[in-house]
Image (cartoon, rainbow, N blue to C red):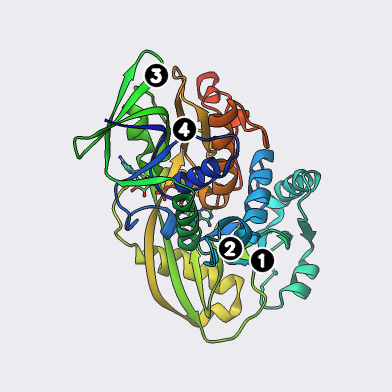
Amino acid sequence: MQKFDVVIIGGGVIGSSTAYFLSANPDFSGSIAVVEKDPTYAEAATPRSAGGIRLQFSTAENVLISAFGAAFIKAADEHLSVGNERAGVEFREQGYLFLATGAGLKTLLNNQRLQHELGAATQLLSTQELSNAFPWLNTLDLAGGSFGPVNEGWTDPYSLLQAFKRKARAQGVTYLNDTVVGLGCGGQHVNEVLLASGESLHCGTAINAAGTNGRTIAAMAGIDLPVHSRKRYVYVFDCRDEIENVPLTVDPTGVWFRPEGTQFITGVSPEEQDDPDSDDFELDYHLFEEIIWPTLANRVPSFEAIKLVRAWAGHYDYNVFDQNVIVGRAPGYDNLLLANGFSGHGLQQSPAIGRALSELVTFGQYRSLDLRRFGYDRLLTGAALKEINVV
Ligand SMILES: Cc1cc2nc3c(=O)[nH]c(=O)nc-3n(C[C@H](O)[C@H](O)[C@H](O)COP(=O)(O)OP(=O)(O)OC[C@H]3O[C@@H](n4cnc5c(N)ncnc54)[C@H](O)[C@@H]3O)c2cc1C
C-alpha cells in the first residue's frame, strides 16, 4: 500500500490548485497525491467553463475569494511558471456588467454597497451612463446597471488548470490516473482511499475535490452532500457588426454574453423548477432559438443578425441548499476535507479555495481568509448562506 500525507480526490482546477498551494506552502513538508480518473478532462467542468471572474456577488466571502483569484491570475507567471516555461494564463480584464429593470435595481444597489465596503470598484450606472459607456446597448427597458471594471473579466480555464497541475508536479506532487471507488473509514478517520485498479492509498488527510461526483465520494464516508449535477449550455456565435468594449454582460433575464476572440459566447441558467439533475451532454438548440437569441436581439440591436457557430454542454456541481461552496472539515471526521458545490463559481474560486485547504491541512485553521461560514455546519443548523448572484 502506498502512503501519502494528503490524497486529493479529483485533479480538476480545485484539486490541482489545492495540490499547488499545499506543495508551495513552506510550513508543509508532507507527500501529496492527486487521484484523477480522466487526465484528458473530457467530461470535467473545468475545461467547459466560461472562465468568468467577478467581484459582483452578494455574499461577502465570495467577493473576497474572487478578489484573491483575480490578483493571483494576474500574477500567474510569477506563481505558476516552471523554469523558463511561462504559466500562459491570461486575464482579460474587460469587466462584468449586470443590467436591471426597476424591479432589480435595489438588489444591485445593496450588492454594490457590500462590494464597495470590501474594496471592489463596482460602479452603479444610470441608463444614460450605460448608453454613453456602451453605445451598442438597448437601455429602453432598463433602470440601470452595475459595472465592475477592476478585477473582473475572464480567463482561459484549461490553461489555468494545466498551469496549476504543471507547477504542482514540479513541486513534487504525484498525479495518479485511477478512479476512487471507496474510502476505508474507522471511527472519525479515513484510513485509506480505495482505487479501481485494486490499489489502496494510506492517507493522512483526504480531500474531496471530485466536482459533480463529490456527492458520491462523500457518500462513501456516509455523508450526505446536497450537491447535484446540473447541465448548462454555452453557445458560440458570430456577429457581422463590429461592436467594441463589451464586458461580460448579464441581462435582467439572466441571459449572459461576452466576447470570445472575434466571436461571442452566451448562455442562461434555467429556473430552479426547470433544472433537473443531468449527466448527459446533449445540446438544446431550442433554448438558443426561443429564449436566448430573442433576448440578445432585444438587448443589442447588432445581435439581430447573428449566426450560431457551435455549442457545448457542461455541468455545475450545484449546491441546492444555498448555491455556495461547502468547504472545510466533513462532519464526524478529523481528516476528511470537502470542497464541493461551487454552483458555477469554482474556476474563479480555485486560487482562494486551494489556499484555504492548504491552510486547513497545515495549520488546522484558516489563516488568510476566514471561510468558516462556508463549512458543512450550516447544513446541520439549516442556516443557509444564500448567494443571489448566480449566473
Ligand atoms: C458551462 C459552465 C460555465 C461555467 N462558467 C464559470 C465561470 O464563468 N466562472 C467560474 O468561476 N466558474 C464557472 N463554471 C464552474 C467551474 O467550471 C467549476 O466550478 C469548476 O471547474 C469546478 O472545478 P472542480 O475541480 O471542482 O471540478 P472538475 O473540473 O469537474 O474536476 C473534478 C475532477 O474529479 C475527477 N473525479 C471525479 N470522480 C472521481 C473519482 N471517483 N476518482 C478520481 N477522479 C474523480 C473528474 O474526472 C474531474 O476531472 C462553469 C461551469 C460550467 C459547466
Q: Indicate which disc, 4 or 1, sits on the residue closer to the N terminus.
A: 1
Left or right: where 11 falls relative to 238:
left
Q: Which residue is located at x 69 percent, y 39 percent?
A: 60
Q: Position of residue 155 (x, y in %)?
A: 56, 63
- Specify the amino acid type for callout 1: Glu
The Cα atoms of the two marked residues, 2 and 4, are separated by: 26 Å
Q: Secondary structure at mark 2?
A: strand
Q: Secondary structure at mark 4?
A: strand
The Cα atoms of the two marked residues, 1 and 2, are separated by: 7 Å
- Specify the amino acid type for callout 2: Trp
The Cα atoms of the two marked residues, 3 and 2, are separated by: 39 Å
Q: Is residue 56 visible?
A: no
Compared to residue 317, the image places residue 183 above or below, namely above
- Specify the amino acid type for callout 4: Leu
Q: Which residue is mark 4?
A: 338
The Cα atoms of the two marked residues, 4 and 1, are separated by: 31 Å
Near mark 3 (Cα within 10 A), the count class, few <14, some 14-19 or many ≥20, is some
Whether the residue under disc 2 has CB within 8 Å of ligand 1? yes
Q: Indicate which disc, 3 or 4, sits on the residue closer to the N terminus.
A: 3
Q: Indicate which disc, 3 or 1, sits on the residue closer to the N terminus.
A: 1
Between disc 3 and disc 2, the foreground one is 3
Compared to residue 265, the image places residue 17 above or below, namely above
Q: Which residue is mark 1?
A: 93
Between disc 2 and disc 4, the foreground one is 4
Q: Which residue is located at x 46 percent, y 76 percent?
A: 237
Q: Which residue is located at x 51 percent, y 24 percent?
A: 379
Near mark 1 (Cα within 10 A), the count class, few <14, some 14-19 or many ≥20, is some
Between disc 3 and disc 1, the foreground one is 3
Q: Indicate which disc, 1 or 2, sits on the residue closer to the N terminus.
A: 1
Labelled disc at residue 189: 3
Nearest the viewer among 342 and 275 is 342
